[in-house]
Image (cartoon, rainbow, N blue to C red):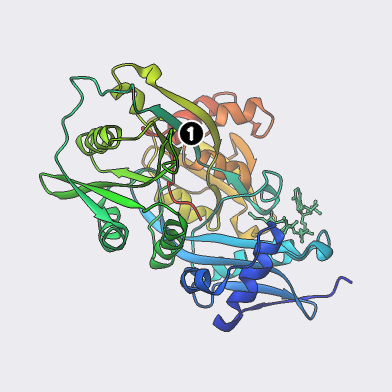
Amino acid sequence: MSDFEIRTLDTEEHRAVSNLFRETVHMPPSDDAEWVYAARYYQPGGALGAFDPELIGTARLFDAELTVPGGARRPTVGVTSVGVRADRTRRGVLRALMTAQLEDCAARGVVFANLLASEAGIYGRFGYGLATRCRSYRVDARRARLRPDAPAGGDLELLDLDRALEVCPGVYDGLERRPGMMSRPEVLWRLYEMQLRRHTTPAKAVVHHGPGGPDGFAVYHVEGATAHPWTTTLEVSDLFAGSATAYAGLWRFLLGIDLVDRVAAESRPLDDPIELLLADHRSGKVEGISDEHWLRLVDVGEALSARAYGHADPVVVEVTDPLLPGNSGAYLITPDGAGRTDRPAGLRMDVTTLAMIYLGTWTPSALADAGRIEVRDPAAPAAADLLFGTRVAAWSGSYF
Ligand SMILES: CC(C)(COP(=O)(O)OP(=O)(O)OC[C@H]1O[C@@H](n2cnc3c(N)ncnc32)[C@H](O)[C@@H]1OP(=O)(O)O)[C@@H](O)C(=O)NCCC(=O)NCCS
């Protein structure tokens, strides 16, 4: 059986999307109580379904904005709930869903698409490149102290979950963003609400107040306080700081909470400066580095002209994009901007590889060395490293 049709689903069909997706990732369906929250995580009109005639595959999205190097923000979509029923895989259903979704995004003027991948081998063929990475960090809270010269931090306000869900979205919206960070539309906060309400211990938020008002927050809950002898872990699900003072103030608070043995922060930026604040940097430990967001440049010309570049000689990059062929062509990248050109290419790459260098996470030289970029001008990789490099590590910090 290989005939199927793709169409946009109605809101009443979203629960079927959820059930199918959860089945493909080996999870039970949401019960009615969870669906009250889960349903709000669906953007109306954002879900595609494949039918043969039953629903056999889904992919959905929500609209947001992505911050690019230099600070500009452009429309992106967060892609999620991608799954194909186990008895209908490997016959092109995902390819049809991805193609329809990307063509729709291109027609709507969306510049990017972001996703988190269950497996590394799936999305490269559709033009998604691994564009941000993150690290998980554990701190021994019984032992850790901040250095005496670490910023003292400002006032802190502890909020319960209901209040946190009112306050934190506004604080997040006001913060300066790293390359790779997304706006968090209402639907995304509803996902986080569902996840935070699922914990058996109460989730809390702490908001940092700087001279100009709230400028950072952390959301956390504590696991393990069930039976003596306790070994408790404070799990940080969000930590965003608009200044070094807010960052130090939030960590000082988290490490000072009583009856906490460990603080675990997942999905932190690769250059997160926590160990620089610790008096003994060995009281904290990087537990691992992993994939974070995969990025698709839906409109390559707009994406390249939106970001800022470092100082180096101009480079011509020739891009191939079989799925959205309008993107294919040569682009001149200069410290002052980027645009289409007829000049001969210094570097040739596919749109997947371009996504890997776009936010500065991987260098063109490294990708050329790995055979993923064809070098036509030997001076081009080093120049492109400087042009595409960023001052801070790209990172999203938003999971979906
Ligand atoms: C991943 C998944 C959606 C793929 O769906 P599918 O309909 O089988 O994919 P298609 O038949 O359209 O395959 C398209 C291409 O991707 C490849 N592919 C599909 N799944 C793959 C996987 N898990 N790993 C590597 N390659 C994969 C196919 O071989 C095919 O390659 P080709 O272009 O060279 O022919 C499906 O296997 C699934 O639901 N998996 C479990 C849930 C999951 O992981 N979802 C993703 C969440 S991020």
Q: In the rendered view, would you say 163 is above or below 358?
A: below
> What x and y, as percent, mark residue 87?
84, 64
Give whichever of 381, 288 is nearer the camera: 288
Taking the image in four quarters, ligand 1 sits in the one at bottom right
What residue lies at 50% left-to-right and 32% top-to-bottom? 384
> What x and y, as percent, mark residue 280?
33, 16
Give whichever of 178, 84 is nearer the camera: 84
Residue 268 visible to the viewer: no
Name the side, left or right, on which 345 lies relative to 284: right
> What x and y, as percent, mark residue 213?
14, 50
Give whichever of 287, 349 is nearer the camera: 287
> What x and y, as percent, mark residue 95?
73, 61
Q: In the rendered view, would you say 324 is above or below 222?
A: below
Q: Residue beneath label 1, please?
A: 135
Identity, as a three-letter code, of the amino acid under mark 1: Arg
Classify mark 1: helix, strand or loop: strand
Q: Residue furthest front?
A: 228
Residue 170 visible to the viewer: yes
Give whichever of 348, 250 is nearer the camera: 250
Q: Considering the image in quadrants, where does the N terminus appear?
A: bottom right
What residue lies at 57% left-to-right and 83% top-to-bottom? 12
What residue lies at 69% left-to-right and 30% top-to-bottom? 371
Name the side, left or right, on which 173 lies relative to 36: left
